[in-house]
Image (tube, rainbow, N blue to C red):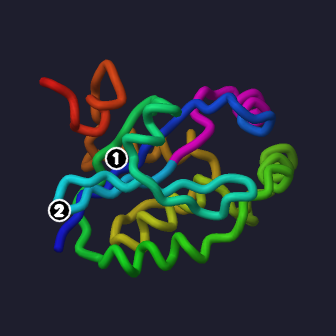
Amino acid sequence: MKKNVYVVFHNLHNAWFHKTISYMRNTTVNHCGIMIELSDKTLLYYHVGPNLGCKVGLAERYFERYVPLTTFLIGETDVSIKHLTSYAEDYPNTIPWKLILWELFKIRFWKPHCCGTFTSTYLRLAGFDVTIQVAPDALLKELKNADHYVERQGESWKDLVGKGDS
C-alpha cells in the first residue's frame, strides 16, 4: 500500500540547543521530521531529539504546539510502515553537544545523530534519492533545489499538511 511522504521543517526555540544551532548557522530552520500520510488519511509524524530517540505521534497534535515553517511532499513509497518504524525505533538519542561540535569545527566526514541525519536517512530507506544531511537547513536547500519535490504553501499548519479549508 502506497503512502505519501513529507518532510516538515520547524523553527523551534524552546531549548538552548535550538537557539544555538540557529545562531551558528544563521538560519531559522533548526528542526525537521518525517510525516507519513496513511491510506486512511491519518498523518504520523516521526521526529528525533535529545533524550527522546525517535518519537512517533499524530502530526496534528505536534503541529498545534510546534507550527511548521514549510512542508515538502516528497512522493509516494510502498516500503512497509513496519520497516520504516523499525528504523525509527532503533534510532539513537541526539546529543546536542555533538551537533554543536560538528558545526563549530566543520567536521564534515562525521555525521552525528540528529533530526537532519534521521530525516534524510529515512527518506533514503523509503526509496528517495537525497544526500545524507546533518543540518535541517541544508536538507531544506537540497529539496528546494530539486525539481521533483513539491513545497506546500499556506497560512496555517493545516494548509501545509493538506488539511486546510481551501
> Where the C terminus falls, by quadrant?
top left
| Residue behind mark 2 | 39
Query: Which residue has dot 1 on it?
Result: 146
Q: Residue 31, position in %: x, y?
A: 58, 42
In the rendered image, residue 159, in percent from the top left (x then y), is placed at 26, 29
> Magenta part of the protein: which range?
19-32
Query: Where residue 112 sits: x, y (%)?
Result: 73, 62
Residue type (three-letter) at the residue carrying disc 2: Ser
On the image, which quarter does residue 98 sit in? bottom right
- The question of residue 99 being in magenta is answered with no
Q: Residue at x 18, y 69 (%)?
A: 2
In this view, the residue farthest toward the top is: 155
Left or right? Give the position of 49 relative to 46: right
* Mark 2 neighbour class, 10 Å CA radius: few under 14, some 14 to 19, many 20 or more: few
Q: Earlier in the sequence, mark 1 or mark 2?
A: 2
Q: Nearer the viewer, residue 144 or 162?
A: 162
Location of residue 147 with respect to 36 vertically, above or below: above
What is the quadrant of the N terminus in the image? bottom left
SS at badge 1: loop
Residue 47 higher or lower than 86, as above or below: above
Amino acid type, mark 1: Ala
- Toward the viewer: 87 or 131? 87
| Secondary structure under the numbered disc 2 in the rendered image | loop
